[in-house]
Image (spheres, helix red, strand yellow):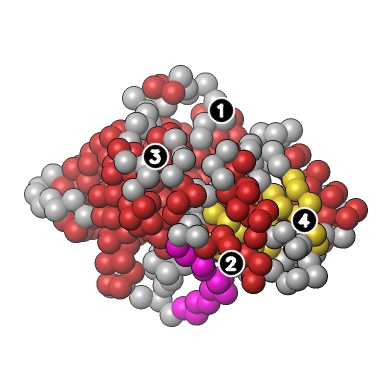
Amino acid sequence: MNNFIYHNPVKIVFGKGSIKELSELIPKESKILMTYGGGSIKKNGVYEQVKSALKDFNVLEFGGIEPNPRYETLMKAVDICKNEKIDFLLSVGGGSVLDGTKFISAAAKYENGDPWDILSKDAEIKDAIPLGDVLTLSATGSEMNMWAVISRESTKEKLAFGHPLVYPKFSILDPETTFSLSEWQTANGIVDAFVHVLEQYMTYPVNALVQDRFAEALLKILIEEGPKAIKNPKDYDTRANIMWAATQALNGNIGVGVPQDWATHSIGHELTAFYGLDHARTLAIVLPGVWKHQKAAKEEKLKQYAKQVWNYEGSDSVDKAIEFTEQFFRSLGMKTKLKENGIGEEKFEEIANRFEIRNQKLGEHQNIGKKEVIEILKLCLE
């Protein structure tokens, strides 16, 4: 295991009724911009809880942040922040709203040109508006990390950025806020968290037993609890376990000191950019293809995963590990093939070209380039 330094500054407030703690978490003199998505928080009671908790605060609102938050939309909120001199951002919604709010936080203080450069050119972030969040969907782990992924409609791009200045000051996680999620949203969240774990785990052994066993435990929890949440969406204990597992999946704990492979996410982002597929749906398609393509390099970890997570040992455990994972995705209602989603290979070259243009190599061995991306996508067809 490699040497590492790890620090996470986010204050987590977890549990039933925790939204009422908001008034103690935000400085009293703050001028707040509350951000949210399509309005579901007004149907499930979360909006009223937040407004009640902040009744003595100066709160403006910005709604309409998309499931794949768009630069064009977020820049409207940036203008509000500048014109109204906003000094605190409160994200109320899922990980996409929080990702968008992180970008607003940085972009509102960016003075060196087009804020898109933060994503496309890794431009330096020197300041950001402080932010916190009330989470209503368990999926991205954005509530306990410094990362965000943003789409730009005009260029069909989906890019990520991260910076310590956009860590949330706090995250409120009340599992009851997830009771009203649809089966589709619940499944998306489970798959997203599941793949987050796997991309920090499914590489090669480095004797990181703590990270490995922690990762395997999270995977088993999601396998056990995921179907329960779809069957009984208002089971508090199930929702609580999934919510905390999703947070732990991407808060850095299981990834410190170990090799990581984010090829599935990188390729999946391009499928979303080109075709508009939900993020989690792209992961369920691409992950089995990456593993099939990289089977030899990942052989030891695939065997370990089959044994520790699926309780399977045999001469075919590598293939079974891939098969069991795909079956799990399908059990949640995921279509795991491109053709099932109406996608052929017409744009494979264009998708793969993006990685070449960026001089971007994927995988824990940095051995996946344009040619390999095309090969992986062909493995995802049917």
Q: Residue at x 53, y 77 (%)?
A: 7
Horizontal placement of 177 versus 274: left or right?
A: left
Label 1 is placed on what type of residue? Tyr
Among the two numbered marks 1 and 2 on one chain, the one whose residue lies closer to the N terminus: 2
Residue at label 2? 21
Residue at 44% from the left image edge and 54% from the top image edge? 175
Q: How far is the residue under mark 4 from the one under mark 3?
A: 33 Å
Q: Secondary structure at mark 1?
A: helix
What segment carries the magenta color? 4-15
Q: Are marks 4 and 1 in contact (CB under 8 Å)?
A: no
Q: Which residue is mark 1?
A: 275
Which element type, helix, strand or loop, lies under badge 3? helix
Q: Residue at x 26, y 55 (%)?
A: 220
Give whichever of 230, 317 is nearer the camera: 230
* Residue 329 in view in this figure: no
Disc on res. 187: 3
- Front position in the image: 101 or 325: 101
- Which mark is first along the chain, 1 or 4? 4
Horizontal and vertical percent position of residue 240: 38, 56
Mark 4, residue position: 59
Spatial separation of the CA atoms under disc 3 and disc 1: 20 Å
Query: Mark 1–mark 2 contact, CB under 8 Å?
Result: no
